[in-house]
Amino acid sequence: MTTGTLLAICRVHELLPTRDSTGVTAIDKRAVDGPVNVHPLGLTGDVQASRKHHGGPTKALYAYAQDDADYWSQQLGREVTPGLFGENLRVAGIDASHAVIGERWRVGEQVVLEVTMPRTPCVNFARYLGEKSWVKRFAEANRVGTYLSVVTKGSIVAGDTIHVDSVPDHGVTAAQVYAGLDEPQAQRLLDTAAEGHLTLTPQVRKAVLKALRVASPA
């Protein structure tokens, strides 16, 4: 069984203005002290400004791995502190970007989370960091982290152990979904969902159907 550590819990520090129709972004997330309650829509005290692109039950929490943060610290020449990428959970010992869709994490004694889909970088993310061609760079590196749904609510605190309790046999990861699925990967996801062992988010289902259409003869 894979285990890791919850290094930090991050929630919105302040809403920042944007140029899009929403008018604000909640990407400015920072580590907080003490226990935090986790509910089906995320962390108590957190918010997502645009529910069209962020948040909701299938994107309740966003996790990012310390190894990926260290990579970007070297690339950017500055520390990628917990929350800088808009993540709720900074984790160590768990490869969030290569977590398997449907994989379940037990955080602390109460909370159970399920890997749902990769994060897609947006223009507000790029503007917040102020890095040239950031969306392209982030996408090409495919160190995207993962969104999680909440299976069992409860309380978590920085320092909690993360246990990977189950990993689906299909083996398709968040990073593979983001990179674009091949036909076998897409078929495995579709079959697992058809068997009732996995619920695909609309975004992942779209990626599955796209791969199968592309691979099928006209």
Image (cartoon, grey):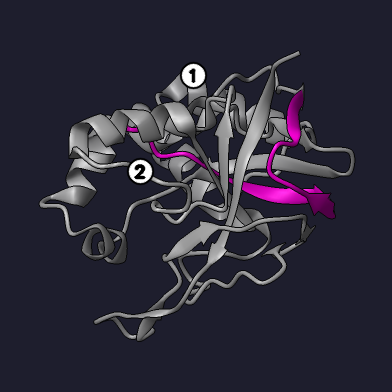
**The magenta segment:** 142-164
Query: Which structural element holds mark 1?
Result: helix
Which is nearer the eye, 88 or 191?
Answer: 88
Report if residue 172 lies within the magenta region: no
Residue 204 vertical placement versus 218 (above, below) = below
Residue 111 position within the rendered picture, expressed as x and y whole percent measured from the top left: 82, 45
62 versus 52 height, above or below: above
User: Which residue occupies the extreme left position in the image?
Assistant: 132
Position of residue 212 measured from the top left corner of the image (x, y, whole percent) = 44, 33
In which quadrant is the N terminus drawn? top right
Which of pointers 2 and 1 lies earlier in the amino acid sequence? 2
- Disc sitting over residue 73 in the figure: none
Q: For the stretch drawn in magenta, what is the main secondary structure?
A: strand
Looking at the image, residue 65 sits to the left or right of residue 143; the answer is right
> Does the magenta segment cover residue 149?
yes
Q: Quadrant of residue 27?
A: bottom left
Q: Which residue is mark 2?
A: 80
Checking the image for residue 184, the label placed there is: 1
Q: Position of residue 177 (x, y in %)?
A: 45, 34
Q: Is residue 180 visible?
A: no
Q: Is residue 60 at all visible to an observer of this figure?
A: yes
Front of the two marks 2 and 1:
2
